[in-house]
């Protein structure tokens, strides 16, 4: 581990057959999609450094897919390990995701079920609000906050929701 690596959380579970590691995040607002390497400190103090193939956030946890070639036995040992990573530099102003960029994105909820499409965005100094035309014909209003928006896939134009039910406001058309 180097001085530039920061503690980001602990391994909650592993799926060696898929090279997948679930991390309970200790850092809020972490741009997990930009993680390139993770250092795993095992319970016995041994450290393992692995390259990340893909990472995505889900609320307060991240799912990290390690690169091919990492032995399953090594991944199985990572359960409960402390995780450190070199955090990316904050994005330049032009790279920061704006809520209005989500217009016309498909919105998905539990289990990958499509819930609707973002049809409008209300921007405000406090928090922005997404207007979603739901698949059931209703209009939903959701705050654009971290627990509600679990992750955004800009390439696929997809918004994955986290804990949205306590924030949901339905309006009949």
Image (tube, helix red, strand yellow):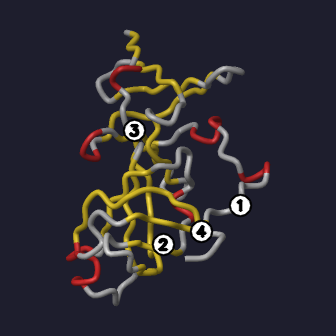
Q: Residue at 43%, 26% (x, y): give it.
A: 133
Between 94 and 43, the one lying in front of the other is 43
130 displayed left or right of 128 = left
Q: Quadrant of residue 89?
A: bottom right
Of labels 2 and 1, earlier in sequence is 2
Numbered label attached to residue 5: 4
Of labels 4 and 2, earlier in sequence is 4
Which element type, helix, strand or loop, lies under badge 1? loop
Numbered label attached to residue 89: 1
Of labels 4 and 3, earlier in sequence is 4
166 displayed left or right of 106 = left
| Residue 6: % across, % down | 57, 62
**Mark 1 crowdedness (10 Å alpha carbons): few <14, some 14-19, many ≥20:** few
Label 1, label 4: how many angstroms apart (C-alpha)? 12 Å
Q: Which residue is mark 3?
A: 161
Label 3, label 2: how many angstroms apart (C-alpha)? 26 Å
Q: Nearer the viewer, mark 1 or mark 4?
A: 4
| Residue 152: % across, % down | 50, 48
Label 4, label 3: how many angstroms apart (C-alpha)? 29 Å
Which element type, helix, strand or loop, lies under badge 2? strand
Numbered label attached to residue 38: 2
The answer to whether mark 2 and mark 1 are in CB contact below 8 A is no
């Amino acid at each position: 581990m180097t001085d530039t690596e920061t503690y980001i959380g602990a391994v909650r579970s592993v799926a060696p057959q898929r090279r997948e590691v679930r991390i309970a995040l200790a850092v809020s607002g972490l741009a997990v999609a930009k993680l390139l390497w993770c250092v795993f400190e095992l319970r016995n103090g041994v450290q393992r450094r692995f390259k990340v193939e893909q990472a995505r956030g889900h609320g307060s946890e991240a799912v990290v897919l390690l690169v091919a070639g990492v032995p399953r036995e090594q991944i199985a040992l990572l359960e409960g390990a402390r995780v450190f990573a070199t955090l990316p530099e904050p994005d330049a102003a032009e790279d920061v995701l704006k809520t209005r960029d989500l217009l016309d994105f498909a919105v998905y909820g539990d289990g990958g079920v499509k819930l609707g499409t973002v049809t409008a965005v209300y921007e405000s100094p406090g928090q922005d609000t997404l207007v979603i035309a739901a698949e059931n014909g209703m209009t939903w209003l959701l705050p654009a906050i971290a627990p509600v928006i679990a992750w955004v896939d800009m390439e696929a134009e997809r918004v994955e929701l986290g804990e949205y039910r306590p924030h949901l406001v339905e309006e009949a058309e």
